[in-house]
Amino acid sequence: MIHPIPPGTRDVLPDEMSDLRAISSTLRETFDAAGYGEVRTPSMEYEEVLRIGDERAAGAGFRLFDGQGRVLVLRSDNTIPIARVVATRYRDAEPPLRFSYFAHAYRAVEPGRGQTAEFLQAGIELIGVPGPEGDAEIVTVVVRALEAVGLEHHRIGIGDASLYPALLEAFGVPEGERRPLLEELAERDLVGLERRVEALGLPEEARDALVTVPGLRGGPEVLERADGAAAEAVAGLRACYELLAERGVADRVIFDLGLVRELGYYTGAIFEVYDPAVGFTLGGGGRYDELCGRFGRDLPACGLALDVQRVHVAQTAEERDRTWAVRG
Amino acid sequence: MSPNEGLTIAIPRGALFAETLDLLDELGFDTAEVRANDRKLVFPELGLVTTRPSDVPTYVERGAADIGITGKDVLLEQEREVYELLDLGYGRCTMVVAAREGDDAIEESLRRLGTVRVATKYPRIAARHFAETGRHAEIVEVKGSVEIAPLVGLADAIVDLTATGATLRENRLEVREEIVVCTARLIANPVAHKLKAARIDALMERLRR
């Protein structure tokens, strides 16, 4: 007998569930110890409210109507709802504010791609601390949490959402030409990007920077190669690196000057979480200094969310690799 | 360092296979074993996995291979989460709209029925092209021998890849519109692109030469 469930959803049975619970409680202990109190917001929100934070309601994939015909969406991330909470429930609270969450989010999936429509996010948000101080705190807490979970080889990719736009501005690329370039970058099509840059007919220095900077990734040495036009963003990344070095987590970091994230509300540092045992990212986040302000409380903020099921896959993959290494 | 820089590389069997092997030879791979084996698909000592061209992005997206080589047509059709790093230049083909020589089935269908029937192995590319040019199209997906679709009345037109146009002419079809030129591309898994950055860059450097 087949009684289907929607594509991208899953039943979780006891063995897996106890692993997931263990991961969540380890993460929660680390978040708690760092002062991040857990919050929970509704699974569904008014679309018009989420649109205040991001014009696509953070790419919500599921919409429904309530009894009054208003459009509800299943939240596609936890960050916009928390920005709403900050502006409404903490309108007078003294910053900084630290929140954590363990909650499902929902996105549309394409069949046959192995994408998940419903996924459990474990995340932290730090509100009221500007970059690079706030960025370094978020990265440090996440590294500690993943170490506690046993991901020995995880890495955090760090880029800056303002870096490429700053280059476009500095080299005088006309407003109308910028969006297509950023779209190529978001689609990871570096061939298409190079082609569009060539077509602009810019001086050689500008052309070279626009083509090579997105391919720069590695240790702090890559920052040297991007100084100049994007000096402000690069200075922020360098300062973040120094703070991470003080905290002893700098060797977890890979700078990635071509990093772009889908969501439109990021304004500064952006993060992705990797593990060499698996070919997909385990989570991501970044700095969103304008988001809380859109809801009425103007505070700089930064956060990162892990996909708990993906962390679990990486954990088992690392265990498998270790077993194989022992067996030779 | 070995020619593959310690990376797992997915390469396409099929139309791009011969030129891909020639390219690997230039990079210092010893491809004799690959050339001699039709059935063997994985060559661990060379770091090579051979698959259908349309499966290359799947292997790379999911991290079974760090990097891969496949056609731009496949990438446009599948929209995978992979980095597109380099245009390798070979395997040059054009994605076209073709129809029977001298007939006006496309125009007639659009005028009288409001939509044109298009057979293709590339449903997304076809749908996007007709949408972008402001025409309704009924996309009929087939897995092979697209050229016969207009001859037997399955469709008014086809969207397909053509290198020389010989197959089209044999079937008395002609190119009506050119959609995009496609060549072989080097792609990378997004995580490998970060975690194995130096090795991928070293390989790209050798490919650029």
Image: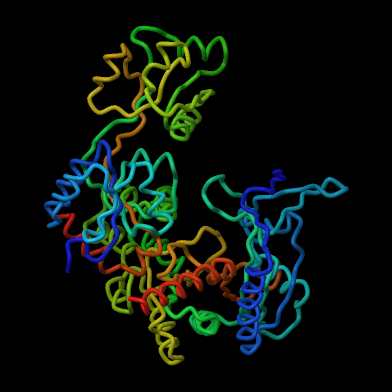
* Position above or below: A36 against A156: below
A29 displayed left or right of A287 = right
Residue at position x 50%, y 19% in the image? B117
* Position above or below: B180 against A59: above
Which of the colour schemes (rainbow, by chain, secondary structure, one colour) is used? rainbow
Tell me residue A148's x, y (percent).
54, 84
Which residue is the extreme one toward the front? A327
Which residue is the extreme one toward the right? A67
* Position above or below: A298 against A73: below
Residue A18 image-quadrant placement: bottom right
Along the viewing direction, whichever of A213 and B7 lies nearer the viewer: B7
* Position above or below: A175 against A43: above
Tell me residue A307's x, y (percent).
58, 67
Tell me residue B25's x, y (percent).
13, 51
B168 displayed left or right of A51 = left
Image quarter where the N terminus of chain A lies is top right
Residue at position x 47%, y 35% in the image? B124
Image quarter where the C terminus of chain A lies is bottom left
Along the viewing direction, whichever of A61 and B24 lies nearer the viewer: B24
A126 displayed left or right of B107 = right
